[in-house]
Image (cartoon, helix red, strand yellow):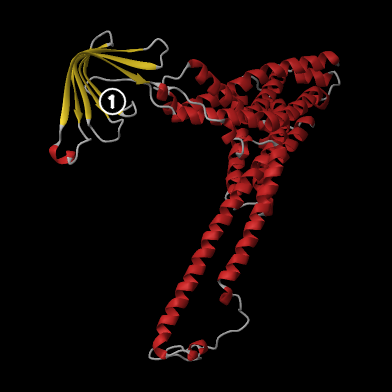
Amino acid sequence: MKKLNLYMLKSYLGPFVFTFFIALFILLLQFLWKYIDDLVGKGLEWYIIAKLMFYASSTFVPLALPLAILLSSLMTFGNMGEHYELVAMKAAGISLRKAMKPLVILSLLLSIGAFLFSNYVLPVANLKFGSLLYDVRQQKLAFNISEGIYYHGLEGFVIRVGKKAKDNKTIYDVKIYNHSKNQGNITVTTAERGTMQLSADQKNLIFTLYDGNTYNDVTTVSRYRISRPFEATSFKKQILNFDLAQFQLNRTNEELFKTHYSMLNIQQLNHSIDSLSNKHIASKDRYLGNFLKKYSYLGDTTQSLPIPKTVTKKDSIALPILDNFEISNHKEIMEVALRGARSAKENILAFNKELESRRQIITKHEVVWHQKFKLSIACFIFFFIGAPLGAIIRKGGLGLPVVVSVLFFVLYHVISMTGEKAAKTGEWNVEFGLWLSTLIVLPLGLFLTYKATTDAQLMDTESWNKFFKKFRLNNKNKS
């Protein structure tokens, strides 16, 4: 029996590792396709891109792991069924339940590992990935000056190069506009030719200009906007140094991102949910007290004002409270009352929006809390879908098992995403929205496991033909 257990583990681990990294690779390609515009043309170092891809791969584990378990279990038992190994086990008195036992234990360990990963590793990966992606997206495009085009990449300067030599260093017909004083084009430098090159530490751009002029508007004299005085300076050689620090990747302090709900573990989520709920209740009570103080005259609703039974177009409704005032002041009093009522209404609507936003933040924390448990349970359930399904269809390889497992996973993922969005918007309860996909997939796994262990012919066409023939005969007899 030990040899059989080892054989089952070896047969399962190979496809599991293979499908897991294939799933990660596909998800990583999707990530690159989505953020390709934020990565290309910024001169990022290779290790920055490698770190970003590594952190992104870590965040994709909650999607790749259940899919890998489903696909590998289906392939393993499909191969065994296709090569009649399951038939040989049954002939030797070993049931499918006993054959699945070591893989059930392994799946249980993987589920526990998935929970630990989701609780301790995933928040750190989300933090590293989120902060690095933010810095990359804020990074400027790499320094690149094209012929005949005004380049605005250097802060405070606009550069135009008429022509570049083949060495990509020698330049001709150069114009440099200095806007660093925020006063417009008051300083302009022109040159017939020059060279541009990076410093040894790659932190500065050095322009060496020849045979040029510098024009500078004089703004220190009175009424300079009318007289427009300027200074002109000619030079044979001039060296300009531009700081390229703005093109380097500046890392943001990760502490600024740590409070986001996707970067918290269960203990931190519990603390955040409690504190946010208490603030929500305190804000609601404080607003109610302030509202009743500000609009105290709206608090007494025990008395109703009498209204005439019949009112014609020529008549007007006379409220008893207005009897204390002159008739000429009634209109003004009504307008003041209407303004007060509208103000109270707008105040209430604005506060309701604030309460709704606070409630949504709490809901998002609760969604992440449930997702940490949902991942581990999904891994365990998908094994009980893939293993019996593979034993039933008896097809291995990357053909039919891939199609079947992808259909099951897409069904689960679509229901899961729908429930998650409905829970975040408040349309569904958080528990119902997050666990709906699990409640749908769990009976399916139990049903397939039962059919596989009882040797049910789910994929046998003859049995289905017999079933439909009986169904047709019963309908004919009833008619």
Q: Nearer the viewer, residue 60 or 73?
A: 60
Residue 255 position within the rendered picture, expressed as x and y whole percent measured from the top left: 59, 33
State the residue lying farthest toward the front: 221
Quadrant where the N terminus sits is top right
Is residue 230 shown to the viewer in this render?
Answer: yes
262 w.r.t. 125: above or below: below
Question: Total marks drawn?
Answer: 1
Residue 271 position within the rendered picture, expressed as x and y whole percent measured from the top left: 71, 43
State the residue lying farthest toward the left: 227
Q: Which quadrant of the structure image shows residue 437?
A: top right
Q: Nearer the viewer, residue 477 or 138?
A: 138
Quadrant where the C terminus sits is bottom right
Q: Is residue 458 left or right of residue 335?
A: right
Image point (67%, 20%), residue name: 16
Image point (76%, 20%), residue name: 86
Q: Is residue 87 left or right of residue 43?
A: right
Image point (23%, 35%), residue name: 220
426 w.r.t. 266: above or below: below
Residue 149 position within the rendered picture, expressed as x and y whole percent measured from the top left: 24, 24
Check disc 1 and report its element: helix, strand or loop: loop
Q: Which quadrant of the structure image shows residue 374?
A: top right
Is residue 383 shown to the viewer in this render?
Answer: no
Q: Nearer the viewer, residue 366 or 16?
A: 366
Q: Nearer the viewer, residue 87 or 406?
A: 406
Inspect the image, locate mark 1, and give the three-letter code of the amino acid beneath it: Tyr
Residue 269 position within the rendered picture, expressed as x and y whole percent measured from the top left: 68, 41
State the residue lying farthest toward the top: 167
Q: Is residue 74 left or right of residue 342?
A: right
Residue bearing mark 1: 151
176 w.r.t. 169: above or below: below
